[in-house]
Image (tube, rainbow, N blue to C red):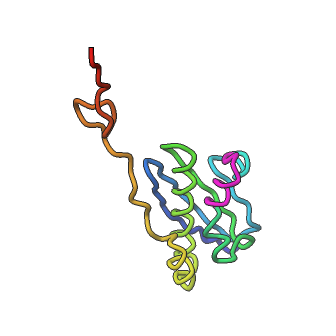
Amino acid sequence: MPETIIYNGTGRRKTSVARVWLKRGSGAVTVNKKSVEDYFPREVWQIKAREPLSVTDTSMEYDVMVRVKGGGLTGQAGAMSHGLARALLKANESLRKKLKVSGLLKRDPRMVETKKYGKRKARRGQQFSKR
């Protein structure tokens, strides 16, 4: 009985971290033991999460299992996309050109700016009171 090879990748976006596992299969995508449609209710998030599969035309070649935590759904979809791109690269090195041109291998460095003391938010000052 031949062993199935499993490829993994870790993706990050904002404060979200996604661990992605790929194995040869029919194209099923599960996120935290739910289907991708159930976990990401908006179509925009679903498209972002599956972007590496559509760019490389491998959506029906692999079964994808994802464990994602932290942040909100937008960050989680971005983290899943990043992790999926890294896992695909381990599975097939010849996909690097397509993934790199699409910008899927680069981690999005944008983070929330930290709050400063004496201010209500990162940049928003206190409300001015004339009297």
In the rendered image, which quarter contains the N terminus? Answer: bottom right
Residue 11 rendering spot, x and y as whole percentages: 48, 59
Q: Residue at x 46, y 55 (%)?
A: 13
Q: Quadrant of residue 27?
A: bottom right
In the rendered image, which quarter contains the C terminus? Answer: top left
Q: Residue at x 49, y 43 (%)?
A: 71
- Bounds of the magenta span? 39-49
Q: Residue at x 56, y 50 (%)?
A: 67
Q: Residue at x 62, y 59 (%)?
A: 49
Q: Quadrant of residue 108?
A: bottom left
Q: Is residue 25 above or below residue 129?
A: below
- In the picture, measured across the screen, residue 90 lies left or right of residue 15, that is right
Residue 4 rendering spot, x and y as whole percentages: 65, 70
- Residue 43 within the segment the image draws in magenta: yes
Residue 96 rendering spot, x and y as whole percentages: 52, 81
Residue 115 rendering spot, x and y as whole percentages: 30, 37
